[in-house]
Amino acid sequence: MSMKPPADEPQTNFIRQIVERDLAANKHGGKLVTRFPPEPNGYLHVGHAKAICLNFGLAREHNGLCNLRFDDTNPEKESAEYAEAIIKDVRWLGFDWDRLLYASDYFAQLHDCAVELIRAGKAYVCSLSADDIRRYRGTLTEPGKNSPWRGRGVEENLGLFRRMRDGEFADGEHVLRAKIDMAAPNINMRDPTIYRIRHTAHHRSGDRWCIYPTYDFTHCLSDSIEGITHSLCTLEFEDHRPLYDWFLDALGVHHPQQIEFARLQLTHTITSKRQLKKLVDAGVVDGWDDPRMPTLSGMRRRGIPPAAIHDFCERIGITKKDSWISMDALETCVRNELNRSAPRAMAVLDPLKVVIDNYPEGGVEEMEAANDPNNPAAGTRKLPFSRELYIERDDFMEEPPKKFFRLAPGREVRLKYAWYITCEDVVKNGDGEITELRCRYDPESRGGGTADGRKVRGTLHWLSAAHAKRAEARLYDRLFHVENPLACDDVMDALNPESLVVRRDCLVEPSLLDAAPGHCRQFERLGYFARDSAEGDRPVFNRTMTLRDTWAKLSKQGAKKE
């Protein structure tokens, strides 16, 4: 698998260049009208973010218009829930639309266009079964053959199509097909289906219709009705462009320019709605908005900021060639944005108690902690300090190895924003487990300075035992442990067993109880965490990202071993 490395600079956007040339040449009357046309049959994912930023971004840059249109012509798989989720996601990314539209609003117009094609002898009702239609279509190397119903007269076709609409036939009994060329090299041009019978209620139009237009017929005509100038699609629609053009030319209507670009293929994840739904239905993830999912709702719940997604989409660029983008590229953009925007906070995920024997019992002082050490304008907050504290359990070792610079028996470390402490005793329970550390502090070392000028190698984060608040931390990681999960016989075989680790008894500083859902903080020395939107008996914080790219480090180590 060839992968495109993380980009340091924004990449080429050939569509932007086309648009700018068209506007300069006064093509389409000097107007730019785009659209983002999702089908409401699932939640949007990171691949859709690329199309959203492209369509809405171009319109914003060039004072154009961009519609949000739901291509809702498949009632069996679509729902209002999905449509509402899509609206929320587009707004979360920072975009608004000039018109909110539905292809279902055009059902009457689309029906009339089909009738017009029948009257012109360019469409016919076919009574072959679905299997026979596939057999008659031919192959990439062999031409298809005409349906025995291709020669039906106009009046017979009009009558049958009317009866299809009136509900006289069962699903699959007839379809309406365009009459083009069964020997065309492009299989999409071999008399494609325009309408099929579906006795299924639509989430917006109810039972008004029992025939529904196909995507290829609906999409181009919806673009035409809306006056779209540049219809931007991913590369899988390139072979459909001749059909897009044929429908519009056959009906003599406004003809947008379809341009295709490479879809986003991101390593260590999947963007197939069918496969994502499989994960949801199997209970592998906690719904479409599970923070491990590549859905925009999952990314929002995980705390990934929209600005990072914008930066990522701009940096990977818009090209005509499919390529794989390393997950590292997205994670780098997220870290860059959160390092700039996320306020700091204290949390202890695996608490180990520390008692400072020479600190006054009952005494409490407030330490001045920076909200962002790199930005003095971000201000400070107060952290209570007392005789009993908690530190991270893995910040202490009884028998430390070389280059372990944290706390150990007889060793001195600095508590961030506070004093130097030295471990003098280790308390264990009957099972030999460490339950408490007894330490002393140097009252002259507040803020990290001492009269004798001595320095320590380790700096630890901490929380006052009397003031810390109980919380749950969910440590999310990549959902899949292989670059291309779809290359496996079953994506379930590619799941990362360590994609979620839950810490039920972590501690956080009191100010974090006021954090808004989705708002990300940097837990000092631990990573970036966001308050979850769904909580139980205690606050929940989702790890958005580690402070460093641990996957890249592991990959390098693996490469060295090989």
Image: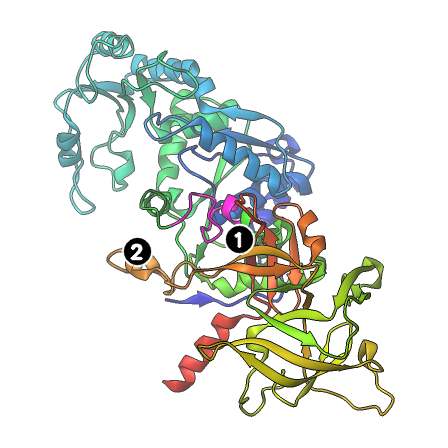
Instruction: Locate residue 551, reporting x and y percent.
Output: 47, 71
Q: Is residue 142 above or below residue 35?
A: below
Q: Residue extending furthest right?
A: 451
Query: Mark 2 belongs to which amino acid?
Result: Val
Q: Which residues are magenta?
A: 285-300
SS for dot 1:
loop
Give the tally of numbered discs: 2
Please tell me whether residue 189 is drawn above or below residue 498 in the rendered image.
above
Q: Position of residue 144 (x, y in %)?
A: 16, 36
- Report the quarter where the N terminus lies: bottom left
Looking at the rendered structure, the kind of residue marked 1 is Ile
Q: Nearer the viewer, residue 36 or 384?
A: 384
Q: Which residue is mark 1?
A: 318
Q: Residue at x 24, y 18 (%)?
A: 124
Q: Main secondary structure of the magenta part?
A: loop
Visual colour scheme: rainbow
Residue 400 lies, with reference to residue 69, above or below; the image says: below
Q: Is 79 part of what is drawn in magenta?
A: no
Q: Which mark is residue 491?
A: 2
- Residue 308 appears left or right of 156: right
Place residue 187 in its image quadrant.
top left
Q: Which mark is residue 535?
A: none
Left or right, 164 with reference to 470: left
